[in-house]
Every structure is written in C-alpha cells, then in structure tokens.
Amino acid sequence: MTAHANELAVDVRGLRKQYGDVTAVDGIDLGIRRGEVFGLLGPNGAGKSTTVEILQGNRDRDGGEVSVLGSDPATGTRAWRSRVGIVWQDESAPAELTVRETVRHFARYYPRPRDPEEVIGLVGLEAKADSRVKGLSGGQRRRLDVALGVIGDPELLLLDEPTTGFDPAARRQFWDLIRLLSDEGTTIVLTTHYLEEAEALADRLAVVAKGRVVAEGEPGALRERYGTGATVRWTEADGSPREEHTDTPTRTVAELTGRFDGEIPGLLVTRPTLEDVYLRLTGQEDAR
Amino acid sequence: MTTTAVPTRTQAPAERLPGAWGLGFQRGLLEIKQFFRQRDQVVFTFSFPVVFLFLFASIFHDDVHGSGVTASQLYVPAMMASGIMSTSFQSLGISIAVERDEKVLRRLRGTPMPPAAYFLGKIWLVLFTGIVETAILLLVGTGFYGVDLPTDASRWFDFAWIFVLGLTGCSLLGIAISSVPKSAKSASSVVVLPFLVLQFISGVYISIDTIPGWMLDIGALFPLKWLCQGLRGVFLPDSARVLEQAGSWEFGRIALVLGAWCVGGLVLCLLTFRWKDRRTG
C-alpha cells in the first residue's frame, strides 16, 4: 500500500537510555526507509545493541520518540509483533527439539508464515533438519536463530550482530539470504562490528559511538566525505620506511620520482578505506 | 495497488492471528516432548517420590495407635501430595527460571505468541506428568502398602477436584516463585528449600499428629497441607480421622483453601511474572 511505502519503517528521534550513571544511548535519531538494508555500525558498548533492543520492544527507553512500522514498540501488539522478525545476539532455541520441530513450531505463531522447509533450506540447515538443537555447532545455532527470525515472513527484520561466530562460508551464505530478503521487500536493520559486512550489505549506514550517531549515509559516500587525502609510503635510500599523509599525492610522488631518479623503493599510495574512516569516526585510530 | 518499485507488505488482519487455546495445546505437546527427551529428568522426577515412599513406608510400618491404619498407609497419600507438588511447583519453579535465564522467554516474547499460550502449555505438561506421577504412586501404594482404592464414586469425585485444585494452586505458586531466583544456577536452591520445609510441616515426611501445632498452623497457610489431608480423606478409612488436627477430613475447608490458592496464585503470577531477566530493564 502506498501509505505504507511512503512512511518510514523505523523513525527514531532523540532516543535516550541510561543504565545507572552510564548513558548508553545519548540522543540518537534514525530514519530508516521501507525496503532498505540499514547498518548500525559501532564498537562494543557504543549503544547499538541497546538501540536495536528498544526497536524490538524488549527494552524500555528513558527518552525520545520511537516508531517502528507505525507503532511504538514499547506497546507493541501481537499483530505488530507478527510483522517484525528478530534475530538475537545470543541463541536461545530449546535444546531438546530438532531443527525441523523448532522451525515448524515457531511457524504456528504467525498468521502468514513462510514454508518451514524453505526457511531451513534458506539458512543452509537441510542436512541438520532432524538433529537436536543441542547437537548443533555454534554457527549452526545462529543460523537456526536466523531461521526463527524470518519464519513469520516479517516486513521488518532486526538483527543484532547476526554473524558473530559464523565461519567465512556461512557468513557469505548469510549475506545472500539478507540480499534475497531485501529483494523481496523486507526492511532490514542490522548491527555489526564487521565493517566488511556493513559495506557488503547496507544501503545506508549509521556509525554509532558513545551513544550518538557520528556519521550517516551510503558506505561509499561516507568514505568520500570523511576519507579525505591519501597516504604515500616509500623506503629511503638508507632502508628506513617513510610515510606522508597528503591531499596531493600526485605531487608527492612526482617529487620522489625526481629525488630517486627512477623507481621509488617500496612505493605505496593508499586512499583511506572505510575502516580508516570508521576508526577515525569512532575515535579508535590508535587501536590500529 | 502499489506504485512503488519495492514490493511492500500489507499488515495481516488481527483476526487471523492464531488463537491462544490452540497454540497452548501445541506448546503443551512440545513441552511434553521436551520433558521426555531429557531422560535423566524423567527418571529423577518420577522415581523421587517412589523412592521416598519406599524408604518411609518400609522404615515406619507399625499400626498408628487407635487409627486403624499403618504408618505405611499414611505415607501413600502423603507421597502422592508431594509428587503432585514436585511435578507442578518444583518443576515449574525451576524450569521457568532456567528458561528466563537462557532467554527462551525473551525469544517467545518477541513473537506474536499470546502469553497465555505459554502458561497453557505449562499446565498441559504439569497435568500430564502429574497424572503419570500419581498413577505410579497409586500403583505402588495399592500393590505394596495396603492402600485400597475407593469404591464410592463420590470419593473419586473428591479425588478429582483435590487433584485439579491442588495441581493448579501449586503450579501457579511455582510460576510465581520462578521470578525469585536471579539466575538459572540459583533456581533449584531457591525452589527446593521452601518445598522441603513445607513437606516437613505439612504432614508428608512426618505424621500430622507428631508435628507441633504452631508448625502445622504455618503449613496450613500453603496448599500442600490441604492436598495431603484431602488425599488421606480419599484413600484412608474414616477411622484415621482421629489423627487429624480437627478430627475430620474437612473437605469443605480443603476446597476453600486450595481454591483460594488458585485465585491468589493467579493474581500473584500476573503481578510478579517477568519475561526478562533482572539485568534487562
């Protein structure tokens, strides 16, 4: 419906959350459009999990306006919950049931679930469908969690660090699943501290640090805007490495060419990666 | 219908959400399946009262003065009451605390499952295990310890309502106490201690005419004492009434106290039940 398509899937204004003396979320604004894959990127303790938990309706807020699919999550009805899929940070499926029993059972909670067999296939657990949950590896359990998050065919999927504990192959498979869901029109909000993941999946990103959004936009645009300049590295005649940060790398290289009279030993010119931008934005440059 | 390139989802009509009774039944099946897959838990749950019945009824077997029953016979309804409370109060108190700690409750809360379905599922589980437990104890009691099954239909009717009210009251009390432990680790200690104390002061381990009056008065505040008394009334000859504090079975009072616990327990659950652990605010 057009009215739905035009309204924001997630609209957050001035969100605040205190834990005792610690301010976890200090005035976050987010506007997430329908059909978008939105990444919340930030270091541990930045407030991104708290934010997502508030969007899920699983944590009370201390201030600000929150609207998720047109409702306040703090007073979410059953009908609202049936439209929101959640993938938690820690797995919690009952240990004694099999993958198939679990997925089939959760499908019963929803008015229009996806086909359980299809969902088991989507997360790549066909071979484990009849295994008890307690016999699954950590990564397989996380994939079951993803299956339980999407079984209700949600309009909005909220994922809190969904690929923690995945091996690289499982992570790729998960990305494909997210793209598939996104192609179907599902709005997806995910937190991650894997930059690679945010860059691969997200249409837009918000970088969160110390409870605030420090930058927001498309991954490429963020790099353009915050990643100015370049770094030129080379090796001096005495063997010592040198590096220079400059807005005019071509001029630097030209000067070096004149000085070395030919090949410049160890020449490397790099533009800042999204990771450099991210570390600078979150005040973690020294961590490298 | 839509003019946007992105396919949009329409909201499901609320009336198509699955109902609480049906989901509660499905959850019950799932709970029972989970229960029976934990082999050690099954063995422990069902054998515990049988082992205690064997120990007590074998150690104390003399005639109880002037009551026309043996001590062994007294222990059969006592252990049945204890078994009902352990399958309801103890198992729910511990399992719900563990499920809360392991975020099972939080996950369910994140789905459109109606909360009532969760409790209905627990009630099906408790009903099922409670019936199995009671049947085992009755079998042992009639087979080895000289207890006769009632021949009177009205006694069976009394048995039915005492079982249902006792089980319900103890279940609700179990759900309520599950909110007390801070973590899964402390759950069994928090739940088992009060249960153990109640068993001593309600006439399970120690004969009712031996326990000091003030202790019995405390026990009388809780459902276990009345459950024991009611089951004695059902399965012992009327000559044994002399052992009771009041000198009679007091079925009316039993119904009143157990019924009050069902209502009060429900209120207590509604007021105190937490879906989240204490760390989540």
Image (cartoon, grey):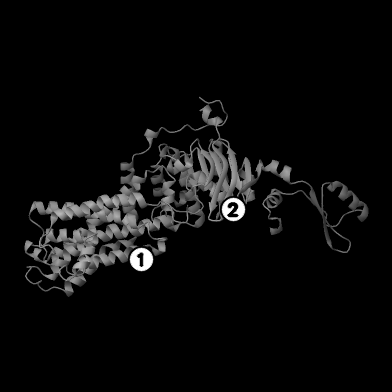
Question: Which residue is pictured at 51% across the width and 52% down the height?
Answer: A89
Which of these two is toward me, A127 or A215? A215
Question: Which residue is pictured at 23% across the width and 64% down the height?
Answer: B218
The quadrant where residue B199 appears: bottom left
Q: Residues within 10 Å of mark 1 (few under 14, many from 20)?
A: few
* Left/right of residue A170 with respect to residue A131 in the rendered view: right
Answer yes or no: is residue A150 visible.
no
Q: Residues within 10 Å of mark 2 (few under 14, many from 20)?
A: few
Q: Are marks 1 and 2 on the same chain?
A: no
**Which residue was labeled with disc 2?**
A168
* Left/right of residue A211 with respect to residue B259 in the rendered view: right
x, y (%) of residue B239? 6, 64
Question: Which residue is pictured at 44% across the width and 40% down the height?
Answer: A76
Q: Give the SS element for disc 2.
A: helix
Q: Give the letter of the chain under mark 1.
A: B
**Which residue was labeled with disc 1?**
B189
Q: Give the letter of the chain under mark 2.
A: A
The quadrant where residue B237 appears: bottom left
